Image (spheres, coloured by chain):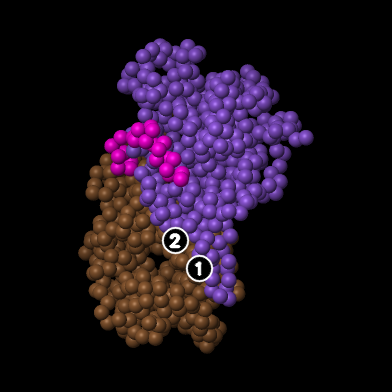
Chain colours: A purple, B brown
């Protein structure tokens, strides 16, 4: 019998997930807009038979350009280019439900799904922050609950659009001059709170029906949304216990929402820092930490915690009187994770910044390939994960080390595929069924 | 001395510009969503050293799926895929100023410009029609003038966003941990009638600064807009005289707007129907016309002319009492062109439909390669065109015929490049300067 198989996603970034990675001698400071850099990353991940690539996003200039590399390529655009440069790997792009129109975004994902032969995924985000809101005509960010309400309606409309063509609409009768069956077009005629969308999509239903739906918010609103819509969830968890609790909670919620919990895959993010000995790995981690500019990180931490600039002191702990999560309208689950990490481990601000530098709240696994594989296997077998979102501290080198040294161990243990096999869709990789069209009464066509 | 060089753009479409092209035995009825089909078209055009590829667009399902192929891939997405599959050719995508946000669209074009090494172009449209409006929360299309007002403000914001990074912002000082010069970021802080956009773009200034700006409306509003912003104009002209008048008018308007008229290239659309003899070409044209379903075309013509269904009769002329152009809120210049064509040539509705079937109002050049090349040279040398928007009736075969039989004649006459030469941007191909950044006081860097 085959062992349960784990799933691996490569979370791409310019020079790596560690905020100081760009300062290493090996790093190209222009990597963020260099197609060849991302093409190399995609090829390494495909060599490692990863399930998918992923790009985070927000429609805003996140960083101060003085402090670190700050421009990026728009993810759907970059992943479309990578679709042509790869053959098997899934392509998961982040896009915001708060700052897009359903008609435009549904078209773009359907187009990428056609172009890639069914390899498109959408990481659905609601986009925290007033800065983003102010790029779209608003004065401040919408309330957390409002963003999630809009997201739910956005999804309903997008699903109506993706299902507005039945799969077998095209008849292509050249002799009679009949191209398609008009009865198989279903315009949404949607009139809701946030959107009115009348007509059918102008893209035929795509290989996967619609993109794999991915989500990454871990707030109460986020988990509720994930249980209803998400087929894969990226999450930041700092301890095995927390990860197990999150995993059990989300699977239960999916079941309660009437879904098969096996159809919701949970992938905690991990930052692997790999050395041929543990000491070498720790030394590499230390080099990265030594390159952090604490003053800059301090400002970003104050921003995340909703504090005035100058409130925090590097060698003191966090203030005791931080507001509860429910008062935060921004990135709510990230807020809680950071505050709990600092309190649980009694970290000073300087120590907290060191811990966050690698993966912005994701767990760092530092050690030999064997040790990293052990940690992955542990979490996977102990009910904390269906797979992992791999976030190398330094790119491309860290992804290369993982693929060439950790992946072979996972394969030898029978936990991970050794080859892609025949061409398949992104859902095929994750062992998920192709979604039926809501207008089709025929039984679901499940691809194997 | 080198002769003045003409420019050629390939207007891509699924099975061709003739509405009946999909019914030919050679045509693939699924071509519209097939990347390989478009990859082949791009390669043919690049073999013909064309300046650029172009895709039209509207965020709406245009056709009745019963009548002809109706789904398409979103143009920026498709052209991004083609950027990776080509090396030299420009990539011009249509996108609407009425149904996009400047921040999102500016990002996407800047991203494509980076990915393609400076080959991105934007065909700016305001999108006529209530059907599109109803996909974006509106009950009806905004008035013609309103759409153009919004388009002008959209352009102003987009230009501010593309110029929000100075070209030489990145210093990449790894030792000091300074990535960029903060003084070289210029957030738009735009507060206007249609848009408020606060922050800088999150994409560094791209190889071309911003995409080549293309425009295709020929109404009064359209020409006013083109004179102010466009670097290339696609236009539908039915006679040499009309084309000359349009050419002279637009160049004069550009001069009056304080611009170098040489920096606004005018490309009429032509539908070449090529045969080894004139009779063969005419026979091919007749085959296409015989495949038109007149009943369907009648409905589309009534829609364009803003008439009730059932108003027109196939074997009668257009009614005498059609409203003036200024009463039309939709596709105003196309309306006028069609009405004038029918009246000038005293066409019946059936004849008009035959004339429109090939290029929806663009002029058809039917004949031998020699005759088509003569027509092109005539228009080019007699002040009617800087180049042409080539719209083959059938694809890919019609593009292949043009590239293999007409292009060699144009080259032999010294009118068109024989090779691309070194890699260059889309503006380099059209002989246009790279735009200076509005925040940079240094002299414009003009690429040759």
Say left or right for B345 vs A406.
left
Give x and y (percent) for residue B296: 45, 74
Q: Nearer the viewer, residue A413 or A406?
A: A413
Which element is circle 1 on? loop
The residue closer to the viewer here, A375 or B298, is B298
Q: Nearer the viewer, residue A90 or B199?
A: A90
Examine the structure image and report whether residue A136 is included in the region drawn in magenta.
yes
Please give the name of the residue rendered at 52% of the width and 88% of the height, measured from the top-left corner. B279
**Are discs 2 and 1 both within one chain?**
yes
Name the side, left or right, on which A92 lies relative to B216: right
Question: Which chain contains the residue that carries disc 2?
Answer: B
Q: Give the quarter of the figure containing the N terminus of chain B.
A: bottom left
Which quadrant of the figure has residue A265? top right
- Residue A416 painted magenta: no
Residue B338 locus on image (x, y percent): 34, 76
**In the image, what residue occupies the spot 44% across and 22% down?**
A336
Q: In the displayed image of the protein, which residue is found farthest to the bottom? A: B279
Magenta span = A134-156
Locate the C terminus of chain B by quadrant. bottom left
Q: Which residue is mark 2?
A: B61
Residue in the picture at 30% in, 42% down: A137
Residue corresponding to mark 1: B66
Measured as percent of width and height from the top left, residue A131 is found at 34, 35
Check the image and name the residue furthest to the right.
A1
Q: Is residue B443 visible?
A: no
How far from the left and from the top, in percent, is residue B48? 52, 68
Magenta segment main secondary structure: helix
| Lower sequence index among marks 2 and 1 | 2
In this rendering, the answer to whether B296 lies above or below A199 is: below
User: Which type of secondary structure does the marked residue at label 2 adopt?
Assistant: loop
User: Could you say which quadrant of the image residue A172 lies in?
Assistant: bottom right
């Amino acid at each position: 019998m085959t062992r349960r198989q784990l799933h691996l996603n490569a979370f791409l970034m310019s020079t790596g997930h560690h905020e100081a990675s760009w300062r290493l001698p090996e790093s190209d400071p222009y990597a963020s807009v260099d197609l060849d850099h991302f093409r190399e990353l995609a090829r390494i991940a495909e060599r490692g038979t990863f399930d998918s690539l992923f790009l985070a996003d927000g429609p805003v200039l996140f960083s101060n350009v003085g402090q670190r590399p700050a421009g990026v390529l728009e993810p759907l655009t970059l992943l479309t280019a990578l679709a042509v440069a790869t053959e098997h790997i899934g392509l998961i792009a982040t896009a915001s439900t708060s700052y897009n129109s359903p008609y435009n975004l549904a078209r773009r994902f359907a187009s990428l799904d056609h172009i890639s032969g069914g390899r498109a995924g959408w990481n659905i985000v609601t986009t925290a922050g007033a800065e983003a809101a102010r790029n779209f005509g608003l004065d401040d960010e919408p309330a957390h609950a409002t963003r999630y309400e809009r997201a739910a309606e956005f999804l309903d409309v997008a699903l109506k659009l993706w299902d507005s063509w039945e799969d077998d609409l095209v008849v292509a009768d050249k002799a009679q001059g009949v191209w398609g069956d008009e009865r198989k077009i279903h315009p949404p005629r949607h009139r809701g709170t946030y959107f009115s969308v009348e007509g059918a999509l102008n893209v035929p239903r795509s290989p996967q029906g619609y993109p794999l739906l991915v989500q990454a918010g871990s707030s109460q609103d986020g988990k509720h949304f994930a249980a209803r819509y998400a087929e894969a969830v990226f999450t930041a968890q700092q301890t095995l216990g927390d990860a197990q609790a999150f995993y059990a909670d989300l699977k239960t919620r999916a079941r309660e929402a009437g879904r098969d919990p096996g159809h919701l895959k949970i992938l905690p993010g991990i930052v692997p820092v790999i050395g041929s000995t543990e000491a070498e790995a720790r030394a590499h981690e230390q080099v990265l930490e030594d390159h952090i500019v604490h003053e800059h990180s301090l400002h970003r931490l104050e921003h995340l915690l909703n504090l005035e600039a100058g409130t925090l002191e590097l060698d003191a702990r966090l203030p005791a009187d931080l507001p509860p999560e429910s008062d935060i309208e921004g990135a709510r689950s990230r807020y809680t994770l950071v505050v709990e990490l600092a309190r649980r481990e009694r970290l000073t601000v300087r120590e907290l910044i060191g811990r966050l530098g690698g993966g912005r709240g994701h767990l760092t696994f530092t050690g030999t390939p064997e040790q990293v594989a052990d940690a992955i296997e542990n979490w996977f077998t102990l009910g904390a994960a269906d797979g992992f979102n791999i976030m190398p501290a330094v790119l491309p080198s860290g992804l290369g080390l993982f693929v060439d040294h950790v992946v072979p161990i996972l394969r030898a243990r029978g936990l991970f595929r050794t080859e892609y096999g025949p061409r398949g869709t992104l859902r095929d990789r994750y062992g998920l069924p192709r979604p039926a069209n809501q207008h089709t009464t025929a039984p679901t066509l499940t691809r194997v």
